[in-house]
Amino acid sequence: MLISSKSMKEINKLKAQLSRMFEMKDPGAIKHILGMEIHRDRKNGKLWLSQQKYVEKVLEKFCMNNVKPVNVPLASHFKLSSVLRTSTDEEKQYMSHVPYANAVGNLMYAMVCTGPDISHAVGVDSRFMAKPGKEHWQAVKWVLRYLKGTSDNCIIFYGSEGSVCGYVDVGYAGDLDKRRSTTGYVFTLAGGAIS
C-alpha cells in the first residue's frame, strides 16, 4: 500500500488506524512499487519515476535486449492498416507463434506508468490485436528497439507545488482504415507527465 499526503501527521494517524485492524509492516519510504522505481532528492524537491528494470526485463523476454536502438517510437515508414493482417496460411502459421498481444500488453504497462512518449505507437499497435500481420509485429519490435535506447529515461517532478499544464495535437484522418482523426494530449504537473 502506498500512502501519500502533505501532512506526516495524517499519514501516521492512518497507519495507526490500519495497524489496529490489520497486521502490517512499515518498510519506510518507498523505493519501488509495481515495477516502478522511485528516487527522491528531498533537499532539492525532486522526485524521479523510472521503469528501467521493468523495461530491461521486457526486452529480455522478447529477445530484444541486444538490438540496435532507434530514436522514435513509431517510424514514418510504418503504414499500418488492417490490409496488412495475416492472409496466407504461411503468415497465419508464423503469426500463431508470435507473442503479439503479450508484447503490446507489456508496452501498455510501461506506457501507463512512466512512458507517455510511446503512447501513440502503442495505441496504433493495439488496433491490430485480433489479427496482426508481420508488419504489425515489426512495428511492435520497433517500439521495443526505441525502449532499448530510452530505458534509463524517467519522469521527473520538480517541487511539491505546481499547476497542471496541458498540450494537445490532432492528426487529421491518420487512421488508414477508417480515416478517423487522432487526438493526442499530455498533461503535466510540477514538470512531469501525469496523463
Image (cartoon, grey):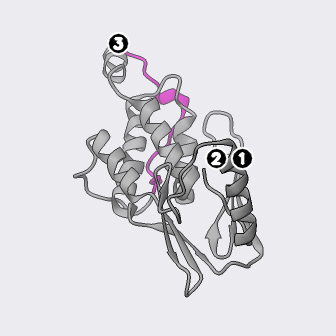
On residue 86, the disc is none
Residue 122 or residue 27, whichever sits in front = 27
Question: CB of mark 3 within 8 Å of CB of mark 1?
Answer: no
Using the numbered discs, state the Cα–Cα distance from disc 3 to disc 1 in whole angstroms.
Answer: 33 Å
Question: CB of mark 1 within 8 Å of CB of mark 2?
Answer: yes
Residue drawn at (69%, 47%) of the image: 20
- Tell me residue 24's x, y (percent): 57, 47
Tell me if mark 2 has few (under 14), some (14-19) or many (20+) residues whose alpha carbon lies within 10 angstroms of its own: some
**Residue 112 vertical placement versus 93 (above, below):** below
Residue drawn at (53%, 44%) of the image: 108
**Which residue bears the numbered disc 2?**
174
Q: Secondary structure at mark 3?
A: helix
Earlier in the chain: of badge 1 and badge 2, it is 2
- The span shown in magenta is 73-88
Residue 144 or residue 128, whichever sits in front = 144
Instruction: Kindly give the residue lying farthest to the bottom in the view shown.
Output: 44
Using the numbered discs, state the Cα–Cα distance from disc 1 to disc 2 in whole angstroms.
Answer: 6 Å
- Tell me residue 126's x, y (percent): 55, 36
Amino acid at pointer 3: Asp
- Tell me residue 124's x, y (percent): 56, 42
Earlier in the chain: of badge 3 and badge 2, it is 3
Q: Secondary structure at mark 2?
A: loop
Q: Secondary structure at mark 1?
A: loop
- In the image, taking residue 53 as reference, residue 18 lies left or right, namely right
Amino acid at pointer 1: Ser
Residue 11 or residue 65, whichever sits in front = 11
Tell me if mark 3 has few (under 14), some (14-19) or many (20+) residues whose alpha carbon lies within 10 angstroms of its own: few
Residue 120 or residue 135, whichever sits in front = 120
Using the numbered discs, state the Cα–Cα distance from disc 3 to disc 2 in whole angstroms.
Answer: 30 Å
Q: In the rendered structure, does residue 152 fall within the stretch colored magenta?
A: no
**Which residue bears the numbered disc 3?**
89
